[in-house]
């Protein structure tokens, strides 16, 4: 039978104290005093002068309890315990046998723990200490008590013993670890014990103890730990354990097998905490590699000083890392034509970072004028530098380099698991690395594999994490695009990212406009080299009138006509423009209803058959159209009423409609699969006066947001939604 360990205030007993004699009569009363640490507290309220009974005024120390026994002889009072103390005996009576046994085992446990604390606090011979530790562990394992402290108390005793004795031999270390191993199967090690384990991993990474004892402990930590912030030494121990695995002969193969064991053989990991904990360990380890650079960051020249040209050796403190500023696009484009003599290159050195910068007076003036204020640029701006203007290299120590290589490889392994990739992309979306790591060529080159895996994943929740986590902040897309600090190719990864984003729900004016403003040059260069995705991008920019400058439009057309694929797609664009002109020509019906079961292809054939410039009311209710038909709907210039009741029209289509059909007045989305993600885009359609969202996945918050942003909205149907 299992019992719960008694806690403070749990006992209610009848007490009789007498000198070595037993009285048959037990008076029932309540226990008024509570347990004190390491003491059994009773109270004294005398009923008879010869035999004090009732409540005791003074506590009884556990060390004073000589013996605890169950009264089991004939005619003994029911459910009584006998505590033998110097000069007398204390009898405790419980309400039933279960409660009596619970008290008995709890008192024995408290008494023995007190004894072991005393014995192990002053160790003389380590052979005896090791024997006592084994006995303590056996006692904890065989105790009928069920409580976390049953296993945790011995671990804390051993942890304190090890923290106070630093002169142990390696053999003593391993003997103690093996002795307490059974307690670690279901309990996290205390902080001091984690320090001891970390030390052993660093000093003896090839020890069999690491594999046989530490492996199940680390597995339990990764499966069950909820917050490394509350127990950072558990994270440090896990980090050192993985590094010790990497020190074995097989190296990363052993680490790979360990990661696979944590994931499990199936396609879905059954433990939701494993991935976040592994990522937390990786991030902390990578951060530690650049800790020296980060600690000296506060003393480095500010970005304002760099903009003002204060980079001479005499203007700065020695041995400090340098922050870099991204040169303006005007400076990059005109740099090759500058004829003014350059200043002598300045070599900025420190104990860790070596930076070579070539500066130009005219360039500095343009850069300063382009900034316009003294505000600090964002993360990527601090790092992105033109290759013709500066180079940067970070030299890590051999140990830091090994740590970096190990944990970047683990991130690669994590990205190979399909079920982990969405959560991993979400965790890495805010770019949780120090800027010194992003300025390190080796790190960004190795991490490129992870970003490539995100770019290849067709799931929107994965590849959407390539973009910034919020407006005004750069993401991995900007970091690995041409001109970004991490871009080390000719734009292949950039093209892959654009391709996957365009293939989902990012074929929008906003996305194209951002490419036109920031990445038009790389897009044209890749299109010139025959990249089909970039050719499609340029065609969409022309089709959606993203480019206003005539010279730029002509340059894009010339780029498209320079390759076979570009010429073919440009001809298709011209054909679509002619069809669009015919479609939008005034004439045709003002109302149109498609037959039920019609498809996207049926709608496309219908709209290509004549002029629909006058079409104001279109009903696609109960058809099989999807979000793909939005590309045809946005070409209807006079459309004011659209009925999509009981279709498969989704969020991607709503985003496209919201950018082009801003004059739409009536929209019926009843029984469509739209969600908050698409419905929020409707806030830009200010002309909407009637909106039916019956039986959709509309939330109450989104409904309130739409009401606030659509001033003309008068008729709304939200029945059978969360907002109803």
Image (cartoon, rainbow, N blue to C red):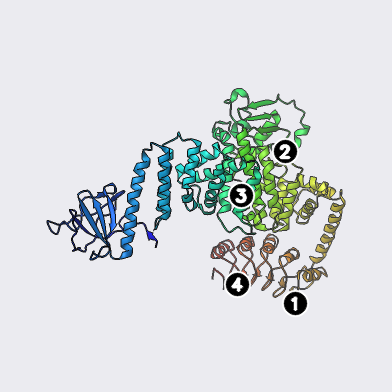
Residue 72, given in percent of the width and then of the height, sits at: 28, 62
- Mark 4 vs mark 2: give the one in front: 4
Residue corresponding to mark 4: 695
Q: CA distance from mark 4 to mark 1?
A: 23 Å
Give the mark nearer the N terminus: 4 vs 2: 2
Query: Which label number is shown at residue 258?
Result: 3
Q: CA distance from mark 4 to mark 3?
A: 47 Å
N-terminal of the pair, mark 4 or mark 3, is: 3
Identify the residue position indicated by label 1 in the image. Answer: 595
Residue with the mark numbered 2: 330
Q: Secondary structure at mark 4?
A: loop
State how far apart marks 4 and 2 are (Cα). Answer: 52 Å
- The CA span between labels 1 and 2 is 55 Å
> On the rendered structure, is 226 left or right of 47?
right
Q: Residue at x 67, y 73 (%)?
A: 646
Look at the picture and state if 267 lies above or below 618: above
Crowding at dot 2, Cα within 10 Å, few <14 / some 14-19 / many 20+, comes out as few
Residue nearer the viewer, 93 or 427: 93
Q: Secondary structure at mark 1?
A: loop
Residue ranking furthest to the front: 74
* Element assignment for label 3: helix
């Amino acid at each position: 039978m299992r019992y719960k360990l008694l806690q403070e205030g749990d006992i209610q007993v009848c007490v009789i104290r007498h000198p070595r004699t037993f009285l048959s009569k037990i008076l029932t009363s309540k226990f008024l005093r509570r347990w004190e640490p390491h003491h059994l507290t009773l109270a004294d309220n005398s009923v008879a002068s010869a035999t004090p009974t009732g409540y005791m005024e003074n506590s009884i120390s556990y060390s004073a309890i000589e013996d605890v026994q169950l009264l089991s002889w004939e005619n003994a009072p029911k459910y009584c315990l006998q505590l033998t103390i110097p000069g007398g005996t204390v009898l405790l009576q419980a309400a039933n046998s279960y409660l009596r046994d619970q008290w008995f085992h709890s008192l024995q446990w408290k008494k023995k723990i007190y004894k072991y604390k005393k014995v192990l606090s002053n160790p003389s011979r380590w052979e005896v200490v090791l024997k006592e530790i084994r006995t303590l562990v056996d006692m904890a394992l065989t105790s009928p008590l069920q409580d976390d402290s049953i296993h945790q108390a011995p671990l804390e005793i051993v942890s304190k013993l090890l923290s106070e004795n630093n002169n142990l031999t390696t053999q003593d270390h391993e003997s103690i670890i093996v002795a307490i191993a059974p307690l670690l199967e279901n309990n996290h090690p205390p902080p001091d014990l984690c320090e001891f384990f970390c030390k052993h991993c660093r000093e003896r990474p090839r020890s069999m103890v690491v594999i046989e004892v530490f492996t199940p402990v680390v597995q339990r930590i990764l499966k069950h730990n909820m917050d490394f912030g509350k127990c950072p030494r558990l994270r440090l121990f896990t980090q050192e354990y993985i590094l010790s695995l990497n020190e074995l002969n097989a190296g990363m193969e052993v680490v790979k097998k360990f990661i696979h064991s944590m994931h499990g053989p199936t396609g879905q990991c059954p433990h939701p905490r494993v991935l976040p904990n592994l990522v937390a360990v990786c991030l902390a380890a990578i951060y530690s590699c650049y800790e020296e650079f980060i600690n000296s960051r506060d003393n480095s020249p500010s970005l304002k000083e760099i903009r003002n040209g204060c980079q001479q050796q005499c203007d700065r403190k020695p041995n400090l890392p340098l922050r870099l500023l991204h040169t303006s696009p005007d400076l990059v484009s005109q740099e090759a034509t500058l004829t003014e003599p350059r200043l002598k290159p300045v070599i900025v050195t420190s104990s860790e970072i070596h930076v070579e910068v070539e500066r130009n007076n005219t360039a500095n003036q343009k850069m300063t004028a382009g900034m316009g204020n003294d505000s600090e640029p964002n993360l990527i701006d601090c790092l992105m530098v033109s290759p013709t203007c500066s180079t940067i290299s970070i030299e890590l120590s051999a140990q830091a380099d090994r740590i970096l290589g190990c944990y970047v490889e683990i991130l690669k392994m994590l990205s190979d698991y399909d079920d982990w990739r969405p959560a991993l992309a979400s965790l890495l979306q805010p770019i949780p690395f120090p800027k010194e790591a992003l300025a390190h060529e080796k790190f960004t080159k190795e991490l490129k594999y992870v970003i490539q895996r995100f770019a290849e994943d067709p799931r929107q929740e994965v590849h959407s994490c390539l973009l910034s986590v919020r407006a005004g902040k750069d993401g991995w897309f900007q970091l690995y695009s041409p001109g970004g600090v991490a871009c080390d190719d000719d734009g292949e990864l950039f093209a892959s990212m654009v391709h996957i984003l365009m293939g989902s729900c990012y074929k929008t004016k906003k996305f194209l406009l951002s490419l036109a403003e920031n990445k038009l040059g790389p897009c044209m260069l890749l299109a010139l080299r025959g990249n089909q995705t970039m050719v499609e991008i340029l065609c969409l920019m022309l089709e959606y009138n993203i480019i206003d400058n005539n010279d730029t439009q002509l340059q894009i057309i010339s780029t498209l006509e320079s390759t076979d694929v570009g010429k073919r797609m440009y001809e298709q664009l011209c054909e679509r423009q002619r069809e669009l002109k015919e479609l939008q020509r005034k004439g045709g019906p003002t109302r149109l209803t498609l037959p039920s079961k019609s498809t996207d292809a049926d709608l496309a054939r219908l709209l290509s058959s004549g002029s629909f410039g006058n079409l104001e009311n279109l009903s696609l209710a109960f058809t099989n159209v999807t979000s793909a038909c939005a590309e045809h709907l946005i070409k209807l210039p006079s459309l004011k009423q659209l009925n999509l009741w009981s279709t498969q029209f989704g969020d991607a289509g709503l985003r496209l409609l919201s950018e082009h059909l801003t004059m739409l007045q009536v929209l019926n989305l009843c029984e469509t699969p739209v969600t908050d993600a698409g419905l929020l885009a409707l806030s830009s359609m200010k002309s909407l006066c009637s909106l039916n969202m019956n039986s959709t996945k509309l939330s109450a918050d989104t409904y309130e947001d739409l009401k606030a942003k659509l001033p003309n909205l008068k008729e709304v149907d939200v029945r059978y939604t969360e907002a109803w």
